[in-house]
Image: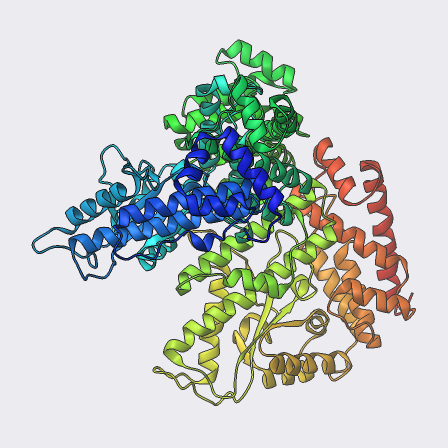
Amino acid sequence: MTDTYPEELIKDAVRRAGAESPFLTLLLDREPALSADLDQGILPSLAAVPIDDPAMPVMRRLRLERRRLALLVAIGDLAGACDLTAVTAALSGFADRALDTAITAAIAERTPGAAPMGFAAIALGKQGSHELNYSSDIDPILIFDPETLPCRPREEPDEAAVRIGRRVVEILQARDGDGYVLRVDLRLRPSPEVTPIVLPVDAAISYYESLALPWERAAFIRGRAAAGDLTLGARFLETIRPFIWRRALDFGAIGEIRGISRRIRDHHAQGQVFGPGFDLKRGRGGIREIEFFAQIHQLIHGGRDASVRAPATRDALARLAEAGWIAAGEAAAMTAAYTLFRTIEHRVQMVDDRQAHHLPTGPALDGLARLHGVADGEVLLDLLRPHVEATARTYDALDPDDEGALSQDGEHLEEQLAAAGFADAPAAARRIEQWRGGTYPALRSPAARAALEAVLPGLIEALARAPDPQGAIVRLDVMLAKLSSAINFFRLLEARPALARLLGAILSHTPTLAEALGRRPELFDGLIDASALDPVGSVDALADEMRGEAGDYQAQLDHVRRVVGEKRFALGTQIVAGVGDPLEVSAGYARVAEAAIVTLAEATVAEFTLKHGVVPDSELVILALGRMGGGALTHASDLDLIYLFTGDYMAESDGEKPLGAVLYYNRLAQRVSGALSAPTATGPLYDIDTRLRPSGTQGPLVVSLDGFARYQREDAWTWEHMALTRARPVFGSEKARSATQAVIDAVLRGDRPDRDVVADAIGMRAEMAAHKPPAGPLDAKLSPGGLVDLEFAVHVVQLTTHAGLDPHLAVAIRELVEAGLVPPTIAAAHDFLTRLLVTLRLVAPDAQPPAQATRNLIARALDVADWEAVVACFATTRQEVSDFWAAVARGRKN
């Protein structure tokens, strides 16, 4: 507000206030100095509100300040000099100051001279989000620290805290000739019917960590240390923060909020129908539904996306839209509605200084309209109506009506399932009856069965729409049998019906992902983020996410396993959902694996050096080969790794327990392999294959870079040099990785024994074919003309021509095609076979022809018309690769 605002608008606001608001008329009479300024069109600044009179009793001073604030804010609001943000900020700021003043006074009265420590007020609700109403109560939670709270001699801290709390409430809400300051509602504290009004901080932390109801945790979305010992309040909030913003969300909180919304609609039925008497706060399409809409989305996404944790409703809507969690149009419409509703709500409260939310009826509605500045009640209703209707539609879409429970009668249930599309309805009905009967441990509690019944209609509908309903329900049954708890899983599906349809597709097509869900159902939580179906980020970004905020070494291992599990599950789901090219998914798998190698190697090295120190001028280098080196993994790929170290192999580490360099790095590499492969409470990670190291399984696990170079130049066999074509350093300093790459480049360009590469390759391929035949007719890797034949042929060309020496096979092939060394058809053949391999590892790991529905998925993933086209293209591609391999084997380029 400013005293330079147009005087005619100030005068008009004063006129409307005097004509339509008994409360503001009283304030104008009781504040003659302010009233005189306002009558002249001058709007005093809010800086005029505080009274600087130490001799004045605190209760009187706060009441007079509140009276002056109420007058100036109301006139500024009515005149348009301050918007809703300014109004609520002024009211909230005063509430904070008044609460802090009351706490300081209450402590000083009991223990004069003591610092106001050990007592804090946590603001919840609209005070917490700086959105306080014009005539609102405040909903603080009062906490104290027994160690620092000032007490009288021989007084217990809990008794002192309660007495201070009672005095704070008295200072603020007791009425006298000057009115009151604030109404105080302490019922948001845990179990208010039995707990004291002020809680010991440790007891409060314990409650919110373990016993808090979902709605209580949701209330802290707007929690803020507002008054008293702010350090104590901030410590309390920081401690319970992980239990408010949960990465693996308890969707019961969302159900609880929706339940509150339904109960509000039922309890305030008379205010639901729009028109005179409509409840702006609790009515259908009103303020509360906008707040709940924002909070539900914050609960869903806030555990993973800290950017949406804004306390204020309009800020939250904006953040959610910016992050893409809600539509920009929804956010804009709800923001506009919220601003209008709150503005009119303030007008209602200005009339008599009551915490009212209903539009009045009869002539009073016309008076409210004139106070707002419009002609009459009909005009005001027309202003509100489109916003109420739009809000109701948006909120109802978030919480659709139930479609009706599945029948408990077996015969009728079979009829429902048959009508839904289950080919063997009796078998599906028997499984559902087993679930209802608590056959599995996860379904034995009443809460679990209630959650099951809530989700069953939508879940069965989703499974019925799945490509293979019968297979999907069988796999779901297997999954439920393995779960220790199913409540949160069911609540997630109830809250996000679209995920139920995706679950049906996963269970229909992918035994690999279904098995992963059976081990870790929380993997499904990751799919609530739309970004889960986007390509994964860079290795650096993934590594940063995997480093996270983990504490000790074991926590780091568990954290990396959780992130890798989520990323691999999401990547597989991209293929099922038809939103990811298998080539991109394959590259994503490799980036996730590389980030895991980097993160866990860093952590293992740091842990190892605590005891054994470091080897001076030396470090560990990890070399990736095979599909990992080529940056193109499948869901089931193991990691082919070689461990090297730089520096003098005769050196010794400098730690408390020193080791010679060779022993040092062999033990370190064993631990890195263990970190990458050993199962923990969160499951396994990768199988590690180190057989490609110098001298294979007969040689040491780790060799020096010099030893590796010497072996490759003097003793390595052709198959080892073929493997080296896809070698890539993935861990080590830039200097060490460059030195390692230089060794690889020199060997591939000819610094190696002179061997008959073609003859060696033919012999190796024949031996492999004898010992590792194709797993099935769709084996894209081992079938004649499959990926192995293609790789052998390309590697022979690379070694004999010293061209196309990129570890990424697709890039190498393009370079060889451009050089005229490989037929152009081989690039497309590589892409087709890789897409087929990546897809089949998920949906048909036995390489056998899958069910018809899954055949359609494979065709879509390979971007061909149908299954017949898949089979035909596979045959054509294999023939092209076979011809290429035969030409290379005959010593010809093409």
User: Closer to the camera, 319 or 727?
Assistant: 319
User: Closer to the camera, 89 or 153?
Assistant: 89
- What residue is at 45 percent from the left and 51 percent from the top? 682
Please provide percent x and percent y for residue 340: 59, 35
Work out whether 628 lies above or below 449: below
Work out whether 885 lies above or below 751: above
Please provide percent x and percent y for residue 46: 47, 52
Q: Is residue 840 left or right of residue 100?
A: right
Please provide percent x and percent y for residue 789: 78, 59
Work out whether 727 lies above or below 777: below
Visible residue check, residue 675 = yes
User: Closer to the camera, 608 or 90?
Assistant: 90
Q: Is residue 890 left or right of residue 764?
A: right
Visible residue check, residue 639 = no
Work out whether 784 lies above or below 871: below
- What residue is at 73 percent from the left and 38 percent from the top? 857
Please provide percent x and percent y for residue 872: 85, 42
